[in-house]
Image: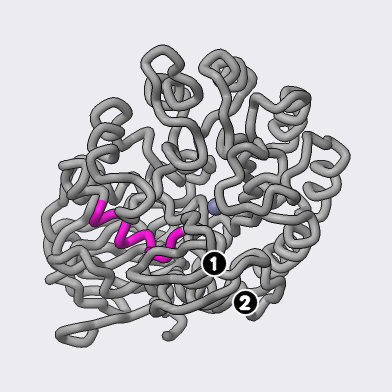
Amino acid sequence: MARCPLTTLVRAGGIATPDGVWDPTTIVIRDGLIDELRTGSSRTGREVIQAADLVVGAGLIDLHTHGAGGAQVIDGSLEAMRRFAAAQARHGVTAFLATIGGSVENIERGIAAAVEYIRAPRSPGEARCLGIHLEGPFINPERPGAFIPATILPPDIGLLDRLASQADGWLRRMTLAPEVPGMAPLIRRAISLGIGCSAGHSAATATEMLTAVEAGVEGVTHVFNAMPGLHHRSPGLLGVALTDDRVTVELIADGVHVDPLMMRLLQRVKGWPRIALITDSIAAAGLPDGSYRFEEQDVTVRDGEARLADGTLNGSTSMLDDAVRRFAVAAEIPWHQAHASASLVPARTLGVDDRMGAVQVGLAADLVGFDEDRQVRWTMIGGDVASVAWRGRRPR
Ligand SMILES: [Zn+2]
C-alpha cells in the first residue's frame, strides 16, 4: 500500500459501465479523482498501473453491512471499524454504510464507533464509511428476523432525535416498519433530518406501504426477507416494492437468503436500476466456518450460512463482489449490469452519485480491477491502491 503520486495512470483492459464493457482505456487519476479517460494506450504520467488483462469498474458500495473480517460496528471501537473496512476493501467495496441494529445500548456504541471512524484520517487500505444505516429499533416485533424481539421499540421521535444528534448528521438510512402505529410522524421527522427511509422487518399492507411511499419512504430493506411473501389477494409491502418505480429494493444476493429463481423474477419485474445489491454481512463474513457472537447472540456459520441456535438465518457471510457474480447468473443479466446494481444504484440511493459510483471524469478514483472470472484483483480508493490480490503477474 502506498500513497499515490500526483498522477497515476491505470491502463485498463476494459471499463465496466451499465451499458457494456468499453474497449481498453487509460484512466488518468489526479488528486484522488478521475481526471481523464483516454481510449488506447498512453505513455505519459508519473506512475502506471498495468491492468490490461482486467476490467476496471467503479468501487462497490454496500448500503447494508454490519461487519466483516471478524469485526463489526457494534464492537464499538475504532480498531474494529478499521478491520471491518479493510475486509471490505479486499472485496472491492470502496464505501459502505455502517449498519447497526439491536438494543439502544448497541446502537449508541455503534454510532460512536462509526462517527469516530468517519472523522479519523482514513488509511489507504480501508473503505470509506459514508454514514450509518440504522436497522430498527422501530420495526415490527412480528418480523424480528434475527433481532431479539425485546430490543424492538415503538416509534419514539425523542429517541430518534437523540440518536441523530449523537450521529452528528451521519445517520443516512433507516429501516422501519411503516404499519406500526405512530410511525408516520417518525418518518416525517427522519426525512426532515435527511435520513433516507427504507421499509423492512415489516408486515405492511399494500395500502400502508403506498401511504409510506407517498410520505417519502424510498426503499425496501432486504426484499423478500423479514416480510410476508407475495399473495395474489393480499399483495402487501412486497406487491408495492415490486411494482412502484419510486422504490429501490435491497437484495441479499448470497444465494442463501433468496432463491436464485426469485432473483430472476425480481430482475424481470423490477430491473437492475431499481435493485441495490447488499450483503447484510456480519462479523463472520470473509472468515471460515465456526462459532461467533453477533449483536449479543451466538451464531454458527457452516457452509457459508450463518444461523442462530433456533435455525434463523442471521445476516450473511458473503461479500459484495460475490453477490455481483451470483446476481448476474441468477438474474440472467450481463455482469456489468449486476455490477451497476452494487455501485451506481447504491450511489444514487445515497445521493452521492455526483462523487462516486461510476468510472467517470470528475468522480472519485474508487476503482476495482476484476479478472476474467470477475474476482477482485485490486481495489483503489481515492487514487490509493487499497488492496492487491494478484494471482498472476504482479502490478508493475
Ligand atoms: Zn441487517
- Give the residues in magenta: 316-326
Bin the neighbour count of mark 2 within 10 Å (Cα to Cα): few under 14, some 14-19, many 20 and up.
many
Bin the neighbour count of mark 1 within 10 Å (Cα to Cα): few under 14, some 14-19, many 20 and up.
many
Please identify the quadrant where the N terminus is shown: bottom left
Q: Disc number at residue 385?
A: none
Coloration mode: one colour
Within 8 Å: ligand 1 and the Cβ of disc 1? Answer: no
Can you identify the residue that label 1 sits on? 67
* Relative to 332, 340 lies left or right: right
Which residue is at 28% across, 58% downward? 57
- Foreground pick, 17 / 61: 61
Is residue 388 depicted above or below 152 in this figure?
A: below
The percent position of residue 351, horizontal first and vertical second, equals: 53, 40
* Relative to 280, 175 lies left or right: right
Which residue is at 36% across, 67% downward? 304
User: Is 318 within the magenta?
Assistant: yes
Are the residues at dot 1 and dot 2 in contact (C-beta closer than 8 Å)?
yes
